Image: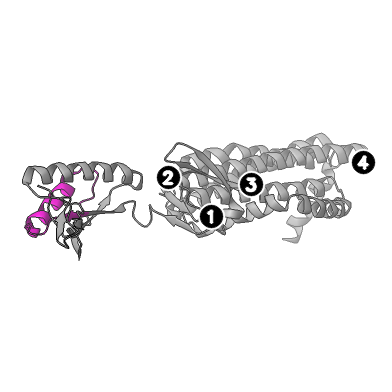
Amino acid sequence: MEAYLHQISTFFANLKSYPVAAALITLGFFAVLAKIVDLSVHRMLKSFCRKSGVTIEEKLLAIIHHPIWVVMLLIGASVVFRWLDLLPQYNYVVRGVFRTLALLVVLTTINRFVTTLFGHWSESREGGTEVINKIEGAAQIALFLVGLALLLAIWRINPAPFITSAGVVGIVVAIAAKDSLSNLFGGISLALDKPFKVGDYIVLDTGERGKVTWVGFRSTRILTRDDVQITIPNAILSETKIINESAPFPRYRIRIKVGVAYGTNIDSAEETLLEVARSNPKISKFPEPRIRFREFGNSALELELLCWAKQPQDRGVVIHEMGKTIYKTFQEKGITIPFPQQDIYVHSSAGRPEPTSNVDSNPKADD
């Protein structure tokens, strides 16, 4: 064994006399190493995809296959110059260039890998897209910072002066951009809490109601029923009471009060209201529409129809359609919707009351 190791050391020692041959052997070694690394990464990636359920194995392999070869050859090329008789300053620059190119290839490949992976997760999941996008953005920022630190290390640049300057500049920027930072942290809290998502109908504490069209780091946009777009800073939105009409289910409850005259068959009126609700295609079948008797009013028996619109944005049109249909159906079936009436009596000088109008305070049906 010792003799074998001695032969190897003698071989490499003799290579110093043949720098070109040493360079070619070094490149060949890194080419073989690149193939070994490629096969190893291929196996690990297949295992990862199988365990995590990722179905884009081919895309991921295509992204990292060629960069592995390029990176290993660039590293080998930077090592090759050790065998060549270059001046130290030239050797430093050439090796730095090759290592910088290798770093750029690695960072670009990782960025493509992360973008493809997060894009696949975003497409395969319903909801949570904003959170995935924000995590992807944070990963890209972290990748940039790591790459910058490695680049400084390659060129042997001391980052201390930059960090000190960045600290002073950071304080100034933080003071100047405190509102933007508060909006950024507000956006992060909204992404973590997920009180709504794009497409939901929300009502703010200030009364605005609309559909969420975009959620960003700094602000959120909603489109009102008047087709007016409202942009709300996330710092304000994170501290505002939000009513999400689309959660946990997209349907919206509608209440329609209807009064029927005293003496009306209340069971028939109730069944008529339910038939009207069931015949409207915008009304949800579950939960089923229902009727509630509320009170004995001054002029009518007060009933309330409870039903659910399939979408919150249909609330106005459903109330409109239901009101018209109820009125027409009641007319067809002879069910009277009374209105308040009042009789006024004026006493004559003889002390006897004389009726002056046919308006009675007692409940009467309008025939």
Q: Do the residues labelled 2 and 4 touch (CB within 8 Å)?
A: no
Q: Which of marks 4 and 3 is in front?
A: 3
> Gap in Å between the C-alphas at discs 1 and 2?
15 Å
Q: Mark 2 or 3 closer to N-term?
A: 3
Q: Do the residues labelled 1 and 3 touch (CB within 8 Å)?
A: no
Helix, strand or loop for disc 3: helix
Q: Which amino acid does label 2 sit on?
A: Gly
Residue 153 position, x and y percent, is: 81, 49
What residue is shown with label 1?
A: 191
Checking the image for residue 305, the label placed there is: none
Q: Nearer the viewer, mark 1 or mark 2?
A: 2
Residue 88 position, x and y percent, is: 92, 41
Range covered by the magenta-colored residues: 258-285
Helix, strand or loop for disc 4: helix
Image quadrant where residue 72 sits: top right
Q: What residue type is labelled 1?
A: Ala
> Gap in Å between the C-alphas at discs 4 and 3?
36 Å
Residue 106 position, x and y percent, is: 66, 43
Along the horizontal axis of the image, is 41 left or right of 80?
Answer: left
> Gap in Å between the C-alphas at discs 1 and 4?
52 Å
| Residue 182 seen | yes
What residue is shown with label 4?
A: 88
Image quadrant where residue 27 sits: top right
What residue is shown with label 3?
A: 140
Q: How many neighbours does mark 2 have within 10 angstroms: few (below 14), some (14-19), or many (20 or more)?
A: some
Q: Mark 2 or 4 closer to N-term?
A: 4
Residue that appears at 23% across and 47% down? 283
Q: Nearer the viewer, residue 238 or 280?
A: 280
Q: What residue type is labelled 4?
A: Pro
Residue that appears at 23% across and 50% down? 284
Q: Mark 1 or 4 closer to N-term?
A: 4
